[in-house]
Amino acid sequence: MSHAPLLSARNVNKSFGRRADRRQVLFDVSADVFPGECLAVIGGSGSGKSTLTRIMLGLETADSGTVAYAGDDIRRESGLVFQDPFSSLDPRWRVGRSVAEPLRIQRRDLSRDEIDARAAAALRTVGLDPAVFLGRYPIDLSGGQAQRVAIARAIVNEPRVILADEPMSAIDVAARIQILDAFAAIRETRRETALVMVSHDLGVVRHIADRILVLHDGRVEECGSTDAVLGNPQSAYTRELIAAASL
Ligand SMILES: Nc1ncnc2c1ncn2[C@@H]1O[C@H](COP(=O)(O)OP(=O)(O)OP(=O)(O)O)[C@@H](O)[C@H]1O
């Protein structure tokens, strides 16, 4: 893990709503993401996990505070994986077209053959045989397969950071291991790529994360290595989360 952060949020505040309905959801939050690491963001429902990570990846703006990115354009250099794979895949498109889409938009320098080859390679990385899956439509995929297609699309343009927001919570338990394997394969083959994972599943987090950031009602409760946070939590709130997960 390099010591210069790839992404760095400082003193981020964020509110939603207007006037009487206005509610602050992030309070002075600072967080770093380093190249090649997996940072898990955990915390209870509504604690601000999605909002923080969306702000860090430029999908949402902070009211105050700063987000620095050690690159050109975080929007172009990131890959996104969300909870429901079917809502992120166009039902009218075959898998091959969906996976290749980011390359077709961003890499006009590549030939069609090169784009097809990279789409096939991305599918292989997530454990899907291109010969079987390139021609399929989303309706012919299981939830776990669809999520792996979404992951293949997220990695096809070799992003420097991947945001996965609850990528397993809509997937049945039996297929979750395949999603975990897909992320493990990405980490193995693209060692500089950072993975930011929002998850309430501490079993998954323990398996994949290098570091954990705990959010509680919009504030950073604690942040440290996975072993330190899960093995020796500093806050009562983190201890409660761990007890509830019966790790
Ligand atoms: N676009 C929005 N407009 C208004 N309120 C929002 C918006 N996005 C998030 N919120 C509110 O901000 C708070 C934090 O939401 P966020 O989705 O970041 O939390 P979370 O920790 O990811 O929650 P969950 O685990 O339930 O997904 C919640 O109260 C949510 O209702």
Image (cartoon, rainbow, N blue to C red):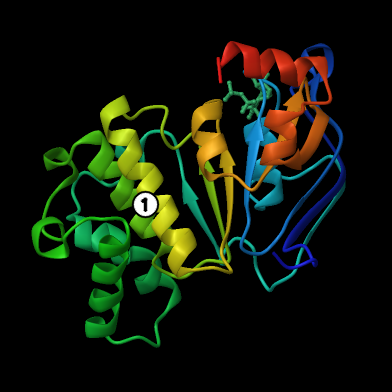
Helix or strand or loop: what does disc 1 sit on?
helix
Q: Residues within 10 Å of mark 1 (few under 14, many from 20)?
A: many
Q: Which residue is mark 1?
A: 182
What percent of the width, then of the height, locates residue 57?
Answer: 65, 52
Q: Pick the residue in front: 91 or 47.
A: 47
Q: Is residue 85 left or right of residue 128?
A: right
The quadrant in which residue 113 appears is bottom left
User: Who's the residue at 38% across and 72% down the image?
Assistant: 103
Q: Is residue 165 left or right of residue 45?
A: left
- With respect to residue 163, does 21 lie above or below? above
User: Who's the residue at 84% across and 39% down the image?
Assistant: 63
- The answer to whether residue 172 of the structure is visible from this angle is no
- With respect to residue 126, does 65 lie above or below? above
**Quick one: quadrant of the N terminus?**
bottom right
Q: Pick the residue in front: 177 or 143.
A: 177
The residue at label 1 has a CB less than 8 Å from ligand 1: no
- The answer to whether residue 145 of the structure is visible from this angle is yes
User: Who's the residue at 28% across and 70% down the image?
Assistant: 121
**Quick one: quadrant of the C terminus?**
top right
- Which quarter of the frame holds ligand 1? top right
Q: Amino acid at mark 1?
A: Ala
- With respect to residue 99, does 228 lie above or below? above
Q: Pick the residue in front: 191 or 193.
A: 191
User: Who's the residue at 52% across and 44% down the image?
Assistant: 208
What percent of the width, then of the height, locates residue 164?
Answer: 51, 44
The quadrant in which residue 180 appears is top left
What percent of the width, then of the height, locates residue 21?
Answer: 77, 13
What percent of the width, then of the height, locates residue 190?
Answer: 49, 68
